[in-house]
Image (tube, rainbow, N blue to C red):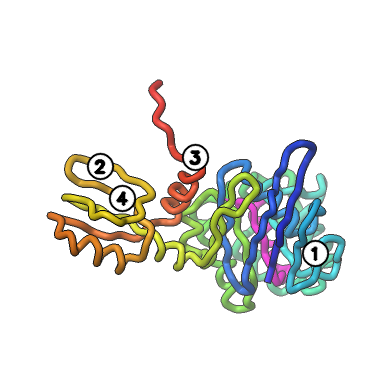
Amino acid sequence: MLEMKHVTKTFGNFKALDDLTLTVPQGAVYGLVGPNGAGKSTAIRHMTGIYRPDSGGITLEGLPIYENPNVKTTIGYIPDDIFYYPSATLEEMRKFYRGLYPKFDDELFERLQEVFQLPRKSPIRRFSKGMQKQAAFHLTICCRPEVLILDEPVDGLDPVMRRQVMSLILADVAEHGTTVLISSHNLRELEDVCDHVGIMDHGKMLLERSLADMQGSTVKLQIVGEVPEGLDILHESASGRLKTLVVRGGAVEVTERVAASKPSYFDVLPLSLEEIFIYELGGVNYEVKNIIL
C-alpha cells in the first residue's frame, strides 16, 4: 500500500499541498485527477521520494520512501516531462537502468522491442516527443517495478500506441499485481482502466474512493414533470420540458423516490468520471462559467 498521511508542502508563501492524505491500495489502478495547479505533480514527486514534505509522512508498505534507496528500486516513475542524458541512446539507458533496478528484465526488453520498434543506437534526444515517451515505457516496464507512477503517461502518443501502452500496463497489473497510480486530464481514458480515484483541488483531497462506489453514490436524473421533494440535487439544467439533474444517492433509491411521484417521464443514468469531476469541483467554485464575448 502506498500512503501519504497529512502531508503539507510549501514553496515560499505558496502552499502546494495542504494536509493531503492519499491511499493507493496494493494491486490497484488509481487515477489521481484535479484541475491545473491542484498539486498532483507535487504529490507525485513526494511519492517518488524527490521532495521531502514539510510535515506528514509518505510510505510504501509501511516503509518511508524519502532517502530510502531500497524502496525506490521498487518504484517506476514516468514524468510528464521526459529527461534523458543528452547523448544517451536507448541501449545506453538500458545499461543505466539495469544498474539501478535489480529486477531489470533484459528478456522483456528484447520482447518489447517488437512493440515499440525504436532505434537502439540513436540519441534519444533526436526522438520525437511520442518516441521519447515510448522509450520511457520501454525502459520503465522492464524494471519490473512493484509500483508504477505515471504523470500524464499517454500525452504525445498516437491513439494506437496509447491503447498498446495501457494494455501493457493492465497486463502487468494482472500478471504481477503491480500497483499503478496515473495522473491524467484524460478522464474518459482513466475511467476505462482505474478502479480507484482521488480528486484533488488546491493541495487537498476532495474525494477518494473506489470508482464503483463513486459512480454508485451519484446519478443523473432526466425527468419531465414535477421534481419530487427531498432529493439531494447537486446540479440542475433544463431543455424545454426535460430537466436534467445530478442527484446524490444510489440508482435504486432515486428511482423509487421519483417513481412514487409519477412524473410523465424519467430515467436514472450513471455518471461518467468526467461528470463526477465537474460536479464535485462545482461545489468549490470550479464550474464552467458563461461569459459573453
Q: From the image, tell me which residue sits under label 1.
A: 65
C-alpha gap between disc 4 and disc 3 = 18 Å
Q: Residue at x 20, y 57 (%)?
A: 266
Query: Magenta segment range?
Result: 132-154
Q: Which mark is residue 167?
A: none
| Pair 2/1: label in front | 2
> What residue would you read off at disc 4?
245
Residue type, label 3: Asn
The magenta stretch spans residue 180: no
Residue 105 seen from this side: no
| Whole-percent x, y for residue 7 in the image | 73, 55
Where does the C terminus fall, quadrant-wise? Answer: top left
Query: The residue tagged with tag 3: helix, strand or loop?
Result: loop
The residue mark sitting in front, 2 or 3, is: 3
Q: Residue at x 41, y 26 (%)?
A: 291
Q: Which residue is mark 2?
A: 238
Q: Position of residue 52 (x, y in %)?
A: 82, 54
Q: For mark 1, does the 10 Å Cα neighbourhood hold few (<14), some (14 to 19), or many (20 or more) residues?
A: many
Q: Earlier in the sequence, mark 2 or mark 3?
A: 2
Q: Amino acid at mark 2?
A: Ala
Look at mark 3 in the image and give the residue it sits on. Answer: 285
Marks 1 and 3 in Cβ contact (< 8 Å): no
Q: Are marks 4 and 3 in contact (CB under 8 Å)?
A: no
Q: Secondary structure at mark 2?
A: strand
Indicate which disc, 4 or 3, sits on the residue closer to the N terminus.
Answer: 4
Mark 4 or mark 2, which is nearer the start of the sequence? 2
Q: How far is disc 4 from disc 1 in space, using C-alphas?
A: 44 Å
Tell which residue pokes out farthest to the bottom in this image. Answer: 175
Mark 3: give few (<14), some (14-19) or many (20+) Cα within 10 Å. few
Question: Which of 79/45 is in front?
Answer: 45
Label 1 or label 3, whichever lies nearer to me, is: 3
Circle 4 residues within 10 Å: few <14, some 14–19, many ≥20 = many
